[in-house]
Image (cartoon, helix red, strand yellow):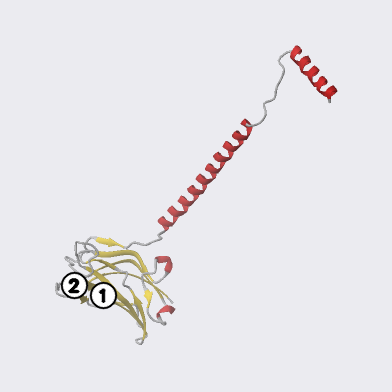
Amino acid sequence: MDLMLKNRIRQPTITDEKSSKIPLRAKQLYLGKWMACWMIGWMHAFPPTSSGQWWFSVDSVLLIYNSSEEALFNASDVYAPASSSYRCPHVSSLQRYSGLLLPSTDYARRWSITFIDFQIQAFNVSSGRFSPASDCTTILTPAILMGLISSLILLLVLAYALHMVIHLKHIEHDDNHKADMYFPQSTEQLEHCCDENTTEKNAI
């Protein structure tokens, strides 16, 4: 079953400098009478640089269907600095959207879930507005894919052009090594040439 959602999520400000893993208030999205979606988040202290800034990440997305059946997706690739919000055009379990949500159970593999125009912020929310966003990065976006294809085409054209240049140089080199043909410039030279040819034939 495909599930397409469009939502933006904010969380209250939470500060705890002593903890490296802080649970965020689970965010529930009501999807109708028989379905609910829970987003469970954690704040992790994993400074990737010497700046040592705090980051937050979404731990998982839990779909509850018919009040009993659960589909759990790992969402650890959804992360951003704690001072920023996270924004992505698509957060999805589908590979064409980079597959940021990974099914954690066999039942979850029967589902595909996609959040459209997704934005979330865990901390430092003020006046109901998002902080500057940290956009998601994907390996093969349509723009990157088109750029790679264009580069490949240009490389093929360049290789063909170099091949033709080398081929023409070989042709010129062969022409220079051919024997020069002698063309007499006057009647006397032509008669002398004919006499020499006749003498050579008689000698043979």
Q: Residue at x 40, y 79 (%)?
A: 108
Q: Residue at (39%, 72%) from the top-left corner?
A: 93
User: Depth check: 102 or 190 in front?
Assistant: 190
As rendered, which of 27 and 53 lies closer to the eye? 53
Image coordinates of residue 145 in percent, x first then y, are 43, 57
* Residue 32 or residue 177, whichever sits in front: 177
SS category of the residue bearing label 2? loop
10 Å crowding of disc 1: few (<14), some (14-19), many (20+):
many
Which numbered disc flags the more N-terminal residue, 1 or 2? Answer: 2
At label 2, the amino acid type is Pro
Left or right, 164 with reference to 10: right
> Is there CB contact under 8 Å for labels 1 and 2?
no
Q: Residue flagged by tag 1: what amino acid is it?
A: Gly
Q: Which residue is pictured at 36% across the width and 62% down the height?
A: 138
User: Disc 1 versus disc 2: distance between alpha carbons?
Assistant: 12 Å
- Residue at the farthest front position: 203
Residue 150 appears at what percent x and percent y? 46, 51
Quarter of the picture containing the C terminus is top right
- Quadrant position of residue 105: bottom left
- Judged by depth in the image, the label closer to the viewer, 1 or 2, is 1
Name the residue tied to disc 2. 12
Q: Is residue 131 above or below residue 165?
A: below
Q: Which label was assigned to residue 13?
A: none
| Left or right of 187 on screen, residue 79 | left
Q: How many marks?
A: 2
Q: Quadrant of residue 94?
A: bottom left
**Residue at the (80%, 17%) spot, across then down:** 195
Label 2: few (<14), some (14–19) or many (≥20) C-alpha neighbours in 10 Å: some
Q: Residue 75, position in %: x, y?
A: 32, 73
Report helix, strand or loop for mark 1.
strand
**Circle number at residue 41:** 1
